[in-house]
Image (cartoon, grey):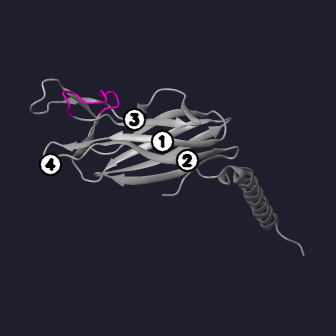
Amino acid sequence: MNLSPRIRRTRTIRTVVALLSLAALTACGDQHAEEAPAAAVAPSPTTGFTENGVTVTLSVADWQASKGTLTAVFTPEKKGFHLYSTELPATGVEGVGRPTAVAVTGVLKTDGKLTAAADVKSISVPGVDAPMPVYPDGPVTTTLPVRADGNGDATVLLGYASCSAKEGCTIPVADHPVHLRVTDDGLTFDTP
């Protein structure tokens, strides 16, 4: 069969396009296969509880060589409620408020300072002369670098108080315990 040059050129272009498409798909397949192990990484240990108008979610990230980051997200259940700063004194200001707090005991130790991913603002509270350091209304995420001194039991102690300018404050929570276990394989929270 004798094909015209134009038809031969069209078939050649189609063949080249098909081969290039196949090569691109193969390359994408290889890239996806390389990414598969990253997707197979075990999820971070997570647990949570709700008490006195706030839901707290705890997780551990980047756990390597007995070190990692403990994250606690404090979420007021109602809109318009805020939490107090981590820098607030333990007994509040003139007895008002309680700091947002995360501490660890047992084989788990702090490996840095507790930080919050929210800006602190000052508010005036009736009957209190000093300004009150609080976070904006809504959830606050805190992080605490931690390390393990061997395997065994540990406890995370959480404290907070939530308030609203319109509805007042909830009962403060102090040293709410969340138990966990440290092993050679990592951390696991006890199921409530």
Q: How crowded is mark 3: few (under 14 residues within 10 Å), some or many (20 or more)?
A: few
Instruction: Give the Cα distance between marks 2 and 1.
Output: 8 Å
Instruction: Give the Cα distance between marks 4 and 2.
Output: 35 Å
Instruction: Give the Cα distance between marks 2 and 3.
Output: 24 Å
Q: Give yes or no for contact between labels 2 and 3 (Cβ–Cβ under 8 Å).
A: no
Q: Say which residue label 4 marks.
A: 167
Q: What is the magenta range?
A: 85-96
Q: Which amino acid does label 2 sit on?
A: Leu
Q: Say which residue label 1 marks.
A: 156
Q: Which residue is drawn at 44% across and 53% down?
A: 48
Give residue 7's mark. Answer: none
Reply above or below: 87 against 170. Answer: above
Choose between 45 and 8: the one closer to the eye.
45
Would residue 139 be found to the left or right of residue 95 on screen?
right
Instruction: Give the Cα distance between marks 1 and 3.
Output: 19 Å
Would residue 159 be found to the left or right of residue 28 on screen?
left
Frontmost of labels 1 and 3 is 1
Q: In which quarter of the image is residue 6?
A: bottom right
Q: Give yes or no for contact between labels 4 and 2 (Cβ–Cβ under 8 Å).
A: no
Q: Which residue lies furthest to the bottom in this view?
A: 1
Q: Which amino acid does label 3 sit on?
A: Ala
Give residue 117's mark. Answer: 3
Q: Quadrant of residue 24?
A: bottom right
- Look at the image and say whether residue 116 sits in the magenta stretch: no
Q: Which of marks 2 and 3 is nearer the N terminus?
A: 3
Q: Say which residue label 2 marks.
A: 180
Q: Which of marks 4 and 3 is nearer the N terminus?
A: 3
Per the image, label 2 sits on a secondary structure element best described as strand
Per the image, label 4 sits on a secondary structure element best described as loop
